[in-house]
Amino acid sequence: MFSKWLQAAKIYSDHRMVSMLGLGFSSGFPLVLVSSTLNLWLKESHLPLAIIGFFALVKTPYSFKWAWSPLIDGIKLPLFNRMGRRRGWALFLQICLLLAILAMAQVNPAEHPWVMAGFAGLVVFFSASQDIVLDAYRIDSFETEEQGAGSATFVLGYRIGMIFSGAFALWLAEYVDWHTVYTVMSLGAVVGMATILASKEPLKDQRYREKTEKLPFLPRVRQFMEKSVFAPFVDFMTRKKWWIILIFIFIYRLSDDYKGQMAYPFFDDMGFTKLQIASASKIYGMIATILGGWRGGQIVNRIGLPKTLMLAGVLQGVTNMVYVGQAFAGNNFYMLVVTICCDNIAGGMASIALVAYMSSLCNVAYSATQYALLSSLMSLTRDVVSATSGIFAERVDWPVFFFFSSLLVIPVLILLNYMMRKKIIS
């Protein structure tokens, strides 16, 4: 038993894990800078809630990154090619990311909101493109039996990156202006740049290039289109009522995503300071998310995916109602911690259950492409549908807004019940 534990722990002392930690940080920190942290800056700039809601649209590239992933996968960068395909693209995109965040730091959103939206969109595009490269780098760096440890370390770095651009950014904003905050945040890209420069190109990728580059260009294109573009779609559409599955994935997180775009503006209206929001959401909330995910994995193993999806769906609606209690409690920090922790526990469970379900749908022959497409569909509610949340929030008071967001879980539960009865999910 002890020898097995030592063998399992040995992988975490591998030098590749240091790379995964740094690259996970580089992947995680941009997201908060174009979502919750930015929303608070916009709110303090006295922008209407409707415009803050529409800023969710800048995250749309995260939902469509699969569309240009073949280009990143197949095109060499002349100036960076000597570093290798993965490292060259990663360094180039991290430089672009640093410059785009610096550009955001120069803009006054109160005077030029759409310029800010444009630069935020650039940050998202470079961040989504970086995710394509770093996911490939992570997968190529490990053998099959090592993927779990590599992914866990990458996710840990991702969470640390989110704390950097969330809790630390809000703490910093208490003492300096937002322009300085975003200038400091741009340095997060330096972590990824240093990691890439100190790392080596994965051997898997080198072997792959040696094999595929022996083919002439047109046969390579034909092979790619057949195996990587058409086949995964055709395979997925052989599933029973596949369109219902896609609708379910699209709406499952709608209740949480709709509410999420307005969460920080709501906390600001309640009179909470940046330090209070930072500690509640990015420290206690992050712990709650991890606990919810851990508990969700246990429940999946115990009662199965369909029942776990149902339970997590109900909890999403119930915990949104806690925000109604927060609206009546007002500036009560203890209630804020309870609200965010309840919300994040439910969200963590729901995320784990949905990821497990989407993973179970993927054919092993096309797992990367099919999962990328399904996860992009899941992101659409966060990045597109939630853009209307600000318009609604301006027309009603906060208790009504959060009560409505909790009701959005009802269509999900009805559809899931139908899928369970018809054995579409089992």
Image: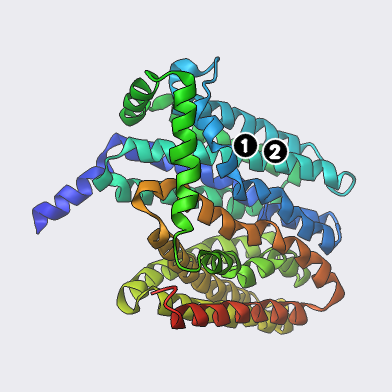
Against 253, is 194 above or below? above
**Residue ID at (48%, 67%):** 348
20, 206: nearer the viewer: 206
Cα distance, mark 2 to mark 1? 6 Å
- Quadrant in which residue 251 is drawn: bottom right
Q: Do the residues labelled 2 and 1 touch (CB within 8 Å)?
A: yes
Q: Residue 186, how many percent across, how many down? A: 63, 37
**Residue ID at (65%, 45%):** 61
Q: What residue type is labelled 2?
A: Leu
Against 208, is 269 above or below? below
Q: Is residue 125 left or right of residue 219?
A: right
Image quadrant containing the C terminus: bottom left
Q: Residue 223, how many percent across, how many down? A: 44, 32
Q: Residue 74, how many percent across, how many down? A: 50, 27
278, 376: nearer the viewer: 376
Q: Can residue 219 be seen in this view?
A: yes
Q: What element carries label 2?
A: helix
Q: Residue 83, how many percent across, how many down? A: 44, 19
- Quadrant in which residue 71 is drawn: top right
Q: Is residue 227 left or right of residue 256?
A: left
326, 86: nearer the viewer: 86
**Residue ID at (15%, 50%):** 6
Residue at mark 2: 122
Image quadrant containing the N terminus: bottom left
Q: Is residue 214 left or right of residue 233?
A: left
Q: What element carries label 1?
A: helix
The disc placed on residue 198 is none
The disc placed on residue 126 is 1
Q: Is residue 26 visible?
A: no
Q: Which amino acid does label 1 sit on?
A: Phe
Against 284, is 232 above or below? above
